[in-house]
């Protein structure tokens, strides 16, 4: 069987299983299984595939047919134009979270460095590392309760050449922190606990529970972060957080109770308020 025939056969099986984007997934799996990029896949398409390559493709294809997300199989997800390696301890970064990056960058645009950034619940490192990539005058600290996530974020920082300006800590939100930051960002777990079992299986089975579980009402992490934020923010500092769908009024209310005013709300591409930017009222 040639490489092209293997890709076509994989796409046909994915199509029959009614999975989204069967051609794209087949090509991405083949590139990973054969260890080549798209240009090489096209150029070497007519060559016979090696049996070990076909075995690797079959193993990946079966995982996809069982409903495992493509980024989990490939072990990498693009965010803010950069590749982030995933582990079972990291949430797979979502495009919606780029709304938080854009809103935070806008909020700190007038400020000159050196800037300090804190990312609470750093996961793969996507938020903190995207911000550091845009602001060479900034350094940052990422905190996660999951040691595996903190280690993954550190590895991503190293792979992206940002480790000199980034540190990582295992901790329970900001409990162990004593210093103040110019910008605090967070994409906290915000799914109400009772809804987790009803999430799409690709999320419920493959993203870590610690990254999803927002307590009984989905707001537990926001309440803790907002309680700590006054002692974490430097003079004129801002707090930018991701919002779950339909949570903007509740989080705005919690923020007001904690002494914060809303500088801005930013919508995601679906028009849902997805990021909130706050400062001390
Ligand atoms: C929704 S994920 C966000 C991950 C990443 N920042 C992103 O945007 O893809 C929430 C993260 O918070 C972490 N987390 C949950 N509870 C925590 C706690 N008590 N203290 C610190 N981090 C926590 C989870 O391990 C997870 O990495």
Image (tube, rainbow, N blue to C red):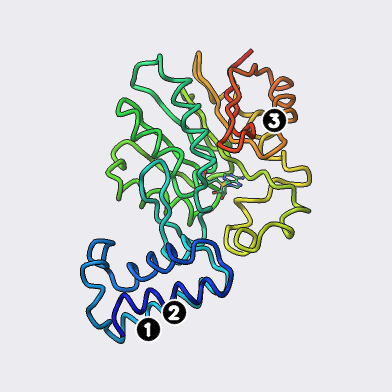
- The residue shown at (35%, 82%) is 54
Towards the viewer: 244 or 123: 244
Quadrant including the N terminus: bottom left
Residue 200 is drawn in which quadrant? Answer: bottom right
Towards the viewer: 79 or 224: 79
Q: Is mark 3 within 8 Å of ligand 1?
A: no
Task: Name the mark on residue 55.
Answer: 1
Which residue position holds label 2? 59
Towards the viewer: 3 or 96: 3
Towards the viewer: 37 or 155: 37
Labels 2 and 3: the sequence-earlier one:
2
Residue 5 is drawn in which quadrant? Answer: bottom left
Inter-mark Cα distance, 2 to 3: 42 Å
Frontmost of labels 1 and 3 is 1
Q: Is mark 2 within 8 Å of ligand 1?
A: no
- The residue shown at (71%, 40%) is 220
Quadrant including the C terminus: top right
Residue 214 is drawn in which quadrant? Answer: top right
Q: Is residue 258 above or below residue 121?
A: above
Which residue position holds label 3? 248
Q: How many marks?
A: 3
Inter-mark Cα distance, 1 to 3: 48 Å
Picture coordinates of residue 8 (x, y %)? 40, 75
Question: Looking at the image, do the residues carrying marks 2 and 1 touch, with CB atoms under 8 Å apart?
Answer: yes
Q: Is residue 274 above or below residue 170?
A: above
Q: Residues within 10 Å of mark 3 (few under 14, many from 20)?
A: some
Q: Is residue 141 left or right of residue 243?
A: left
Picture coordinates of residue 239 (x, y %)? 55, 25
């Amino acid at each position: 069987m040639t490489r092209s025939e293997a890709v076509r056969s994989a796409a046909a099986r994915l199509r029959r299983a009614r999975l989204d984007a069967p051609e794209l997934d087949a090509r991405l799996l083949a590139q990973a299984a054969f260890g080549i990029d798209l240009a090489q896949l096209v150029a070497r398409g007519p060559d016979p595939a090696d049996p070990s390559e076909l075995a690797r493709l079959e193993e990946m294809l079966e995982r996809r047919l069982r409903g495992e997300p493509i980024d989990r199989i490939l072990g990498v997800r693009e965010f803010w134009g950069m590749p982030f390696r995933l582990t079972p301890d990291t949430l797979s970064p979502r495009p919606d979270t780029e709304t938080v990056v854009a809103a935070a960058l806008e909020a700190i645009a007038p400020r000159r460095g050196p800037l300090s950034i804190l990312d609470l619940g750093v996961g793969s490192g996507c938020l903190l590392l995207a911000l550091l990539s845009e602001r060479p005058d900034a350094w940052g600290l990422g905190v996660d309760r999951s040691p595996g996530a903190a280690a993954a974020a550190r590895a991503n920082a190293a792979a992206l050449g940002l480790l000199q300006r980034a540190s990582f800590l295992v901790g329970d939100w900001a409990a162990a922190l004593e210093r103040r930051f110019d910008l605090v960002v967070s994409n906290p777990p915000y799914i109400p606990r009772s809804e987790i079992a009803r999430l799409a299986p690709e999320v419920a089975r493959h993203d870590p529970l610690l990254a999803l579980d927002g307590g009984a009402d989905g707001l537990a992490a926001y309440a803790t972060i907002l309680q700590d934020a006054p002692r974490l923010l430097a003079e004129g500092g801002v707090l930018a957080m991701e919002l779950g769908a339909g949570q903007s009024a509740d989080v705005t209310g919690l923020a007001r109770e904690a002494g914060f005013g809303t500088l801005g709300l930013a919508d995601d591409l679906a028009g849902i308020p997805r990021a909130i930017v706050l400062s001390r009222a």
